[in-house]
Amino acid sequence: MVAFFSPRRMGKRLILVLALALTGTFFLSQILITFSSSTPSPIGTEQQTSWTSGWFRQDWARRKEKFPVNRSLMVRPPSGPPRQLPRVQHKFAAPDAEFRKLQATRQAAVKQAFEKSWGSYRQYAWGYDELRPVTLEGHNSFAGWGATLVDSLDSLWIMGMKDDFAEAVKAVQKINWFKSSGPMCSLFETNIRYLGGLLSAYDLSQEKVLLDKAVELAHMLYAAFDNQYRLPVNAFFFTDAWNGDLQLSYREVAAAVGSMSLEFTRVAQLTGDPKFYDAIDRIKVHLSISQNETRVPGLWPISFDLHDGFSAQDTMFTLGAQADSLYEYLPKMYALLGGLDQTYATMHKTAMDAAEKHILFRPMIPDKDVDILFSGNLRAYVSAGDLQMTPEVQHLGCFTGGMYALGGRLLNNDSHVELGKQLARGCAWAYKATVSGIMPEVASMVACEEPKLGKCKWNKSIFEAKGGKYRTEGMPPAFASITDYRYILRPEAIESVFVLYRITGDQKWLDWAWAMFQSIKKATETEKAFSAIANVLAPDARGNKANGMESFWLAETLKYFYLIFSDPDLISLDDYVLNTEAHPLKIPKPT
């Protein structure tokens, strides 16, 4: 990456610059730009990579665009009072003393795990993106702005850790978006972790500095839309973004394109600046137009060509990796806009009906009277008449149960709520099926064929003929194969279990959640924190701890466990939508 002021362009003037440096080192350090090859330091330190000089800080709002949108033509959030949306949460009765005691005990255990994780991050990796929980050192993987710090803000507030929250807010004030651990960041990850985390923490605490920091970041991310198509570029190279030179991809991941709507809409709602809503509304229009023009009408593939009106040439369709949060955000946008934009509701229902037809499947399992579904992958080779569903189960796809149930409640669709129950039960069952009590990252199963989504009897011959003949020792009976044995502290299974408890009020979800938490704690706990593991079938094996603790462990996984054992009014699903990083954003209400 070429810096704004390149020493190579200076020629003989470099001699003079070096001479001046002997007496003016500090001054020159502010105007010469270098990229350090050393290990980046935590936020707020001068050693961290600076891709531009400090006197540009906070100027993103005044950056001159190459392809500006006429402000008078910008689309604004829907006007008028929000609609009264259907009730999402179950009407919980007042709990008895025994239930309150049990919930409090379980909640305390979750909080203890959070405090242990946060305390070690604070002690060994403060300001870094992540803690490496085995070697106890900081690590940067998300631009070095302190991903765990920002991602954990709302969790700290929700769990009542107000002193830690105040300390974290002071650290957040020091973040300089012009200093990073590398020349670029992922627009998607920066949006969901940093922007979502700041907005949520502001919605909960009303600390203005958090909103200021969020708006500062939002102005920077808005530069990703500065191209002739006004569509986002996920590979956000800072210098190119500042200069208006970011290039659209011919194969942009669907989730990256479709997962900015909640955060940018909330910025527009809080600031009144229409440019943020205008940016994501354009994506909505493209999604709406293209939805029924793909190889599987109703669904979008895992990637788009953004040069050609969301041209969908990719043949892979899934609710899992690379597409997940595009679908997740549709019903949540309907709620965040107070039910005033029916387009999101229509797209959601259309997509969920198509997924039910083509992607959901019932696995062949030996267990009797177990009513479960999973979400697989679909390959569309030539046309809608040539489809092949692969019953591959991703832990990442376990969010689908909560998505179906939430959308079903918001749109009064009981059949979708029922599908949500079956999907969430599927992932809870997959946890119980392994020796560790934890579901693997990716596994394959054998799908029942007829009737569609109907139950089928266990048939060992059919199971083996369809891929289950050669299996690893210790593999659960219904798993044909496991292609990724890891558990990386993911939240998606408990996310759906939490949503289904809040929607149904059925206490069996609480017992499943507690069993999941105990299994995760047993398999992943280290001396000082918690670690991803390499193999859920060998939880006690030497070297199984993978030395990873991504920020979503604190932002999502432990937050969902904490909330399911809390009073249902804490972060009610009728008051908040949670972004894909579990950051609650306040839903506008009728006055």
Image (spheres, rainbow, N blue to C red):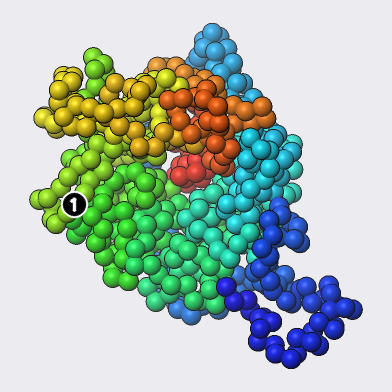
Residue receiving disc 1 = 380
- Residue closer to the observer: 353 or 339: 353
In the rendered image, residue 79, in percent from the top left (x then y), is placed at 41, 58
Residue 157, visible in the rendered structure: no
State left or right for residue 98 relative to residue 304: right
Residue 326 at what x, y percent from top left? Answer: 36, 51
At mark 1, the secondary structure is strand
Q: Quadrant of residue 215?
A: bottom right
Determine whether, in the image, residue 173 is placed left or right of residue 3. right
Badge 1: how crowded within 10 Å, few (<14), some, or many (20+)? some
Q: Which residue is drawn at 76% across and 61% down?
A: 46
* Closer to us: 537 or 310: 537
Question: For this rendering, which residue is in front, 164 or 3?
Answer: 3
The part of the image, by quadrant, that contains residue 201 is top right
Q: Image point 57% across, 42% down: which residue?
A: 551
Residue farthest bottom in this picture = 12
Is 276 rendered above or below residue 339? below
- Tell me if residue 342 comes above or below residue 251 in the rendering: above
